[in-house]
Image (cartoon, rainbow, N blue to C red):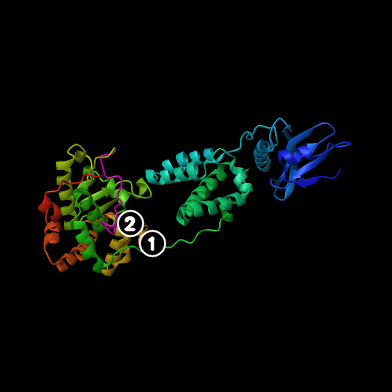
């Protein structure tokens, strides 16, 4: 009797006649691979499928589920889905999934990349955490699978990139794939049996545009007025110093008291982006020194214990500001917006591109520029340039009708926002 096609249900199966000779199959029209095998005396639910790799059929398999009557068709269909999913992954029914001895898994490759490359080369904790999040969250279902599987099936990587783009956005999707690319390339050096082509070559990368969120000189007036009435005084000074220094927020949040050299007018950044090898000193303008002195005095009042160690103190586990983001309704620009603003204002002040690179600790372009010794320029030339940038920023306060902003910015005393002067509202101590 030829095979039949129908939607398998308890009622439909009960009506099927037994085979006169041998057996015949009934294939489900709802779930491909779910079948009922009918013999001369019994009817049996089963799942059958095939595993294909690189266009070649490696094996076919059929697995008995249960006798009709011992299980409903709905229960059998659910079991069939699990069996078919295992076959699709290359696992034969009844076999326990196992990894060939010596095959490197994604977890092993990631941990080796983390320990042997990132930690050894002094990558920042934030960078390591980003990689960990990508590997252990976005690729959690791959983490204990052989890395070679991704190398042989780059389509899986391309599909995952599409999935992450849809669920988390284009920038996170691209970032996750860059992390996977780095881990795979590092693993390939010690595991030559891995496919040579990195599976991320199959990714159709999302277009990324530079976020142009920086301010120009004309925008500074409104922003300073927003910042002036900020209730958290330590965070107020933190955002101001971000703008005056052009620093990355993470580096400044971890600034310690012993990193400040008032005599040489320098702030040392021991672990910037790029690790300890990129450590550098920020020359301090007069406005930056006033900002730092105000911050130290506020910290000693609010958090005396933390203030012995940290510049930007907070009631947090670390003792310093951990989260620098603000409500845009309270402060329109923060974080890397201020780094972009610093770069924009420096350019409008006609500071040379090379000096801006040195002040912001960017990699210096060109062979000849690479011979410049940055430390020899700090005490004189770069500090003068820093003074010019600070002056260009603070001169905008002259355009503010009242002198409250000037009073704050030109003082080393603690100046309360006008709202607190009038209402004596308590200082907010958010970290």
Residue that numbered label 2 is attached to = 336
Give above or below for 268 relative to 105. below
Indicate whether residue 279 is drawn in magenta. no
Residue that numbered label 1 is attached to = 211
Give above or below for 258 relative to 97. below
Which residue is at 15% across, 46% downward? 426
Residue nearer the viewer, 144 or 332:
332
Residue 218: image location, x then y, percent: 24, 69
Which residue is at 38% across, 45% downward? 126
Residue 103: image location, x then y, percent: 61, 37
Q: Do labels 2 and 1 touch, CB within 8 Å?
A: yes
Q: Total label count?
A: 2
Q: Say which quadrant the C terminus sits in.
A: top left
Image side of residue 6 versus residue 404, left or right? right
Circle 1: element type: loop
Residue 423: image location, x then y, percent: 11, 51
Residue 38: image quadrant is: top right
Q: Main secondary structure of the magenta part?
A: loop
Residue 241 seen in render: yes
Crowd tier of the residue under label 2, counting other residues whose Cα lies within 10 Å: few below 14, some 14–19, many 20 or above:
some
Circle 2: element type: helix
Image side of residue 200 versus residue 92, left or right? left
Crowd tier of the residue under label 1, counting other residues whose Cα lies within 10 Å: few below 14, some 14–19, many 20 or above:
few
Which residues fall within the magenta stretch?
A: 318-335
Residue nearer the viewer, 25 or 271:
25
Question: What is the CA distance from the residue labelled 2 to the residue labelled 1?
Answer: 10 Å
Residue 262 seen in render: no
Which residue is at 82% across, 45% downward? 3
Which residue is at 62% across, 35% downward? 99
């Amino acid at each position: 009797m030829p095979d039949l096609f129908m939607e398998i249900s308890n009622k439909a199966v009960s009506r099927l006649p037994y085979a006169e000779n041998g057996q015949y199959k009934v294939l489900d029209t709802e779930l491909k691979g779910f079948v009922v095998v009918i013999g001369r005396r019994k009817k049996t639910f089963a799942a059958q499928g095939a595993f294909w790799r690189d266009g070649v059929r490696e094996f076919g398999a059929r697995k008995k589920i249960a006798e009709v009557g011992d299980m409903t068709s709905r229960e059998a269909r659910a079991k069939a889905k699990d069996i078919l999913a295992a076959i699709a992954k290359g696992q034969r029914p009844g076999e326990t999934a196992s990894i060939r001895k010596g095959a490197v898994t994604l977890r092993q490759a990631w941990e080796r990349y983390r320990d042997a490359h990132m930690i050894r080369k002094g990558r920042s904790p934030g960078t390591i955490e980003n990689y960990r999040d990508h590997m252990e969250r976005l690729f959690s279902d791959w983490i204990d699978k052989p890395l070679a599987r991704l190398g042989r099936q780059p389509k899986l990587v391309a599909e995952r990139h599409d999935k992450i783009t849809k669920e988390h956005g284009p920038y996170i999707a691209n970032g996750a794939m860059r992390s996977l690319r780095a881990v795979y390339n590092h693993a390939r050096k010690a595991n030559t049996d891995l496919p040579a082509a990195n599976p991320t070559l199959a990714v159709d990368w999302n277009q990324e545009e530079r976020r142009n969120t920086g301010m120009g000189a004309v925008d500074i007036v409104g922003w300073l007025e927003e910042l002036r009435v900020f209730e958290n005084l330590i965070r107020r000074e933190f955002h101001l110093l971000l703008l005056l220094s052009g620093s990355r927020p993470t580096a400044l949040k971890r600034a310690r008291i012993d990193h400040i050299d008032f005599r040489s007018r320098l702030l040392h950044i021991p672990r910037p982006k790029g690790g300890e090898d990129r450590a550098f000193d920020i020359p301090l303008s007069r406005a930056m020194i006033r900002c730092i002195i105000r911050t130290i005095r506020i910290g000693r009042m609010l958090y005396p214990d933390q203030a012995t160690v940290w510049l930007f103190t907070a009631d947090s586990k670390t003792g310093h500001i951990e989260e620098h983001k603000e409500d845009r309704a309270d402060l329109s620009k923060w974080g890397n917006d201020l780094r972009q603003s610093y770069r924009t204002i420096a350019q409008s002040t006609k500071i040379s591109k090379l000096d801006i690179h040195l002040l912001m600790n960017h990699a210096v372009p060109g062979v000849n520029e690479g011979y410049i010794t940055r430390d020899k320029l700090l005490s004189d030339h770069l500090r003068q340039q820093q003074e010019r940038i600070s002056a260009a920023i603070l001169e905008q306060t002259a355009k503010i009708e009242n002198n409250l902003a000037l009073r704050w910015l030109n003082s080393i005393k603690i100046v309360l926002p006008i709202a607190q002067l009038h209402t004596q509202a308590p200082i907010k101590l958010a970290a």
